[in-house]
Image (tube, coloured by chain):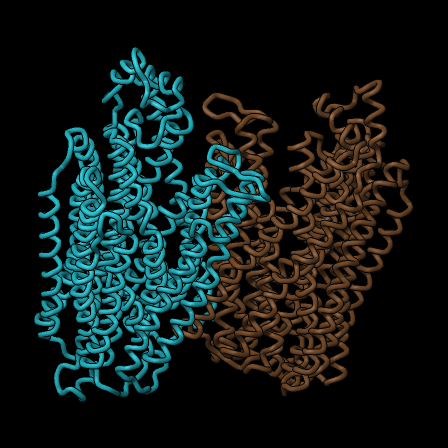
Chain colours: A cyan, B brown
Amino acid sequence: MNYAILAVLTGVAALLYSFWRAIWISKKDPGTEKMQKIGSYIAQGAMAFLMAEYKVLVIFVIAVAVLLGFSGASATDSHPLVALSFVVGALCSALAGFLGMRVATKANYRTTNAARKGLSEALAIAFSGGSVMGMGVVGLGILGLGGLFIFYENYFGFTSDKASLVLNVLSGFSLGASSIALFARVGGGIYTKAADVGADLVGKVEAGIPEDHPLNPATIADNVGDNVGDVAGMGADLFESYVGSILGTMVIGAAFAPTLQQIDGMSGLSAVILPLVLAGIGIIVSILGTFAVRIGESGNPQAALNMGNFVAGILMIVASFFAITAFLPEKWEAVSILTGENRVYTANGVFFATIFGLVAGILIGIITEYYTGSGKPPVYQIAKQSTTGAATNIIAGLSVGMQSTAIPIILISAAIMLSYYFADLYGIAIAALGMLANTGIQLAVDAYGPISDNSGGIAEMSEQPPEVRQITDKLDAVGNTTAAIGKGFAIASAALTALALFSAFMQQAKINSINVADPIVMAGLFIGGMVPFLFSALAMGAVGRAAMDMINEVRRQFHEIPELKAALEVMKKHHGETHNVKGNDLKVLEAAEGKAEYAKCVEISTKAAIREMVIPGLLAIVIPVLVGFVFGPKALGGLLAGVTVTGVLMAIFQSNAGGAWDNAKKMFEGGVEVNGKIYKKGSDAHKAAVVGDTVGDPLKDTSGPSLNILIKLMSVVSLVIAPLIK
Amino acid sequence: MNYAILAVLTGVAALLYSFWRAIWISKKDPGTEKMQKIGSYIAQGAMAFLMAEYKVLVIFVIAVAVLLGFSGASATDSHPLVALSFVVGALCSALAGFLGMRVATKANYRTTNAARKGLSEALAIAFSGGSVMGMGVVGLGILGLGGLFIFYENYFGFTSDKASLVLNVLSGFSLGASSIALFARVGGGIYTKAADVGADLVGKVEAGIPEDHPLNPATIADNVGDNVGDVAGMGADLFESYVGSILGTMVIGAAFAPTLQQIDGMSGLSAVILPLVLAGIGIIVSILGTFAVRIGESGNPQAALNMGNFVAGILMIVASFFAITAFLPEKWEAVSILTGENRVYTANGVFFATIFGLVAGILIGIITEYYTGSGKPPVYQIAKQSTTGAATNIIAGLSVGMQSTAIPIILISAAIMLSYYFADLYGIAIAALGMLANTGIQLAVDAYGPISDNSGGIAEMSEQPPEVRQITDKLDAVGNTTAAIGKGFAIASAALTALALFSAFMQQAKINSINVADPIVMAGLFIGGMVPFLFSALAMGAVGRAAMDMINEVRRQFHEIPELKAALEVMKKHHGETHNVKGNDLKVLEAAEGKAEYAKCVEISTKAAIREMVIPGLLAIVIPVLVGFVFGPKALGGLLAGVTVTGVLMAIFQSNAGGAWDNAKKMFEGGVEVNGKIYKKGSDAHKAAVVGDTVGDPLKDTSGPSLNILIKLMSVVSLVIAPLIK
């Protein structure tokens, strides 16, 4: 009990840290008037999207809360308070996204400005911006989940017979977090890709103007997209992973309560509180890790970020060993939820399980880096196949993406079996948690990416000298390895968390076997397996339609605004190189300044994203409810197994294919050698590679990352409705 | 017992029918010398491939037979004779492929020749060629399976306690059929796509000469590919489906023996023999159906083929009602294999199950036609998205393919649940069998396709006047709807047969529950789900490498053979239109005649296909053996469930995406209207659509159709090794 409060206090510490860094950033020099103006456009656009999104989600949250309240009242093992948990979860998720993005849109142009002076300060600002997001997410996560837990414990009284009830009510928090996350990921993903494709296809390809050029009406929307997709979307994503893995472990740990009570003579809740404590330790070591991210003027930003992650990782392993052995008895015997038979558990076994999770996550990250890294054999293969055209580039990318599923799946399977061997289902759940305990610093590093990306865009739009852009490019180029490892953790933890939630669901639905030979289970398995395909199709279709809206708007502006039209002629005349334009041509360019209607493009992206996120988002909620109520808990169990398996596979396939295509295209910037011939940027092979990159975009930035959330959202929905359908 | 012999006799009838049609075809006028020469090139190339393939497979068959012999000797519920079944199954499959292709390569140029006189005779020859294949497959299938069954029954004595043993030994037949089928499908698929891509990319795109032009060295290989891929490959494919569905039903029916014995006072084998009887009836009605395929000079070939299928279908439904109600008691009670509890079975219930299977198959066919049919909304959407480039075309195609999985999966799930409801697992198995009972005529219609396709190619190569090509085109254009329905049956029956084999596996491995919540099952599920991704990646990579070999060879010939080089210059000058070439240019073209080294291209395709088919083929056999022996039957059960679910999904996705891309490209031949503007052949939009078609080729012709076999092969491998790992 006291320890749960301690854990909650680390959440407060994380929020204070966030607050401190946010103030530090605000005090930094915001730069030239032009930078500030562009920065404020981006910030306004991002906020406008967030507000539009939240407006829709408020309706959704209220509707679901009312339904949950009624259904909670009607089941014996549930309670109307599940609606409160849901609302708090949704609020915390939304708040984390809001805070993170607010600071990110302050940090971006301040990073650009700092880059005028040097690397060290620019890195510090960009990383601080990311760390506000990271610490905000974990702080709100543990504060919300831990706070509600303590509240319910006092309200219901946490005796063994109330365990199931308290945790069912608490699972509403995870449901809230996951539903907001899915909408945020899908909506943000559609927004960012629609703007990106629109800006590229009409601006770069058709009109021939450089990326991020102020003449392009979609350029602000494109930069807004980086924020709503990569900052707010990713933040909500990790928020749900984080709380999902904590909650899953708590639910499974509750089964030990009677046994542990006999041993410790107290509440027997140590296995339930341990996940909160580990998460709390993760926050402390993450904060310590952020102090290790420092760099000199000639230093390597990648090394600096790695150092932060590394320090936090080592500290976490050491600390979790002591926490686990201190919290759990050396040895105890309890009924395995799965087999129904007694088995021996050890504190060491639980610790080993976390290590297996970590090792699997790191190895999957390395494999991801191998399949998607620039210059590595698979990516080179794609680049090489681009020399025979777009078709062979696409086939090669599909092939690489599909092949890249093999080893990660084997690693996930090994982690499942080993952590199960050492600590049963609790081991699987805690292995997932071990991967996510350091979310604070991992997310700081992840969110640093879009901030540096934005700072580069702002440097371009505010027409900074090339040295500034060089520094922002240097900042932007790093973080790929870290991002790959982050992706590995995200995928592996999603699989393990889904499994933990799956077991939790079975516990709550009071079924102890889901036999795949049972036709109703097999039917559920088929339908569940199909959902990620349908979901991906919908997401891709949505990106296509939204991009089409954007393309039409940019074309319209180029056609209807006379100053833009004239300026485009000048650009064409000078082949997009405007630094040396003089005389009348310069006047034409100057006259066009500020004539592009950025706000219209922002509005179009916003509207399209909000409109298109609804159906795929609802799908994830409606399908399990429908299957659960019509065909019962066994079919629903099959559904969850199916969606987990193909969801993980499709997520790996889509993310890696997209990443590989992206880097294959980038390889042409340095030239690709095939059979002694060198193919450069602008060659036909490069154009074929651009096709691959465009195909990969919605896969890796919209549907791929959403699938991880989809899996868990469907599991949590099932967990919440379990008492109603058992 | 007597009925099993009767069933075998229908197999003899089918073979006699085949023989009769083959002789009839041989007697037809083989046409001009040029036609005969081209025809013999194709026939020789096809045979050369088949021989090369069989040489490799002989080693494989011997090796596996020896292993099976030893393992059969070491398990109590098996017997070394399983090796005999395996060898007979492999032989029958190879023989079916050989006979079918031999006749197809005789029918193709005779069809061309008949087309000089009119439609009616040409259709008759092409369809007869197909029916030799169709009847050969079903004849050999039932002769082999039924013959071995009768032999083992006499050898072991078919008492209740021997049922498991006899059927395990018999399952070797299905294993033989499935392994040959996988190699044939993969090898044939690689061959045909490598030749196709090579011929198109260098001949059509680079050199600008028309399709099937004799100057193109890859043109014979391309036509050979149609035979080895679409005739021999498809024949082996349907042979294994046919045999698998019969065997699966027999194994499950064996569980009724004790109960039925009490009722009929005899062997109690009626539920085991019923599948053979239904297959026998299917042969008779298929033969009757072939007589309904007739056409006048102004008739519609599609209507003629549909009539054949329709007549056979109606007869089959009526006949199977009488057979089922005559064979099975009106009502009986027996233990459900799945629940272990008694349930009531009725003959009517079994009949209903077959109807559900049929209805699901037909509906899936209609859905397939909707998603891939020319002019239908999804295909139009792809064509429309081609106007903004190859990238949007690809995204649209992927999206259509993924979306097209939804309804078929729901239909399959419904068929599973309903047929289970009416007749338990036996119902599921017999539903699959119901779909495949008419394989005889279905395959005749399917194999008619590549024969007409070939006849068109021969018309082109032998420089027939346009009227002849018009008739062969008319023959070639039909059969799409029939093919779509055939595909629907193939997919649905694969899912149901896999499920039946899965139950048979559990029965043989003596496990009654495969709980997906068990981590070892979940690990199996993950790995099984991954296999279709890995397999598809390997197949795509193989096509890419084989095509590269072919591209290099065609380029070499164009470069090194002076007559070809000169002729290409002439072709370029006349933009590929050579009908009006005169004077010196004509001499150059004539000098080039026969200079293209077709045999080299045939050899390269053959070598590449044989080399590349080995690894994906072995994968399907090694993985279940490895998982079964290392992790036990439960993990293997999970593996089978995983491979079935993602295998079916990936098969639907890949086949439909490929089909939709193909038809989207074809739509440009008539012009595609987007926002009032019409895009024609040769436009940029059309070129983008060609990219999509090329991407779809290996998906729809190599990996997609192989996945159906992969699923069943892995299931049969597991079934065969079940007694060893239980």
Q: How many marks?
A: 0
Q: What x and y, as percent, mark residue A391?
A: 55, 41
Q: What x and y, as percent, mark residue A71?
A: 21, 61
Tell whether A637 sits left or right of B284. left
Tell whether B621 sits left or right of B299. left
Tell whether B228 sits left or right of A444. right
* Quarter of the figure that contains the C terminus of chain B: bottom right
* Quarter of the figure that contains the N terminus of chain B: bottom right
A609 and B495: which one is in front? A609
Residue A560 appears in the figure:
no
A703 and A230: which one is in front? A230
Q: Residue at x 49, y 75 (%)?
A: B338
Q: Residue at x 41, y 56 (%)?
A: A369
Q: What x and y, as percent, mark residue B232?
A: 73, 54
Please, which residue is most extreme toward the front here? Answer: A298
Relative to A630, residue A110 above or below? above
Picture quadrant of residue A443: bottom left
Relative to B196, residue A200 above or below? above
Q: Residue at x 73, y 21 (%)?
A: B574
Relative to A482, residue B659 above or below? above
Residue B654 appears in the figure:
yes
A405 and B254: which one is in front? A405
Q: What x and y, as percent, mark residue A488?
A: 36, 60
